Image (cartoon, rainbow, N blue to C red):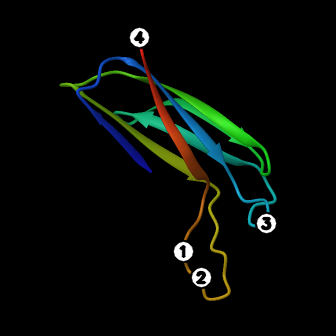
Amino acid sequence: VSYVRRNCTPGVLQVSLHSDASLFGAPQTVVASVAGRSVARVRFQAPDDAVLRVPLESEGGVCRVTFDVSPTAVPGGGDSRRLGVHFDAFNFEPR
């Protein structure tokens, strides 16, 4: 998952997450990276929700974050999608 904010000033991105307990019986980890560097992570297990707070720095007026989810799973039964966590909301808080 990628997040891009234009006309961005430094701040914090708060990301609300949840997962699917019927698909994941073990904890999952979400790592946020900026410019290839890990800046935040959260580990949680469904049915719990999680909030990840990511510090944002503007580069040329643009803030970019890449999120990696582990593990992911394929549901099966004809559904070949690779699923991870649900990204429910992105809330930006300027500094």
Say if mark 4 contacts mark 2, CB within 8 Å. no
For the residue carrying disc 4, how many other residues have a C-alpha within 10 Å: few (<14), some (14-19), or many (20+)? few
For the residue carrying disc 3, how many other residues have a C-alpha within 10 Å: few (<14), some (14-19), or many (20+)? few
Is 49 in front, or is 69? 49
Q: Circle 4 sits in a helix, a strand or a loop, which is it?
A: loop
The structure residue drawn at horizontal position 79% and vertical position 55%, both measured from the top left corner, is 26
Q: In the rendered image, which quarter contains the C terminus? A: top left
The percent position of residue 38, horizontal first and vertical second, equals 48, 32
The percent position of residue 58, horizontal first and vertical second, equals 28, 22
Q: Which mark is residue 79?
A: 2
For disc 1, the marked residue is 81
Q: Which callout, 4 or 3, points at the residue further toward the start of the chain?
A: 3
Q: Which callout, 2 or 3, points at the residue further toward the start of the chain?
A: 3
The structure residue drawn at horizontal position 59% and vertical position 65%, both measured from the top left corner, is 83
Judged left or right of residue 40, residue 73 is right
Measure the alpha-carbon separation of dots 3 and 1: 15 Å
Measure the alpha-carbon separation of dots 2 and 1: 6 Å
The structure residue drawn at horizontal position 54% and vertical position 74%, both measured from the top left corner, is 81
Judged left or right of residue 32, residue 28 is right
Is 14 in front, or is 55? 14
The percent position of residue 70, horizontal first and vertical second, equals 62, 53
For disc 3, the marked residue is 22
For disc 4, the marked residue is 95
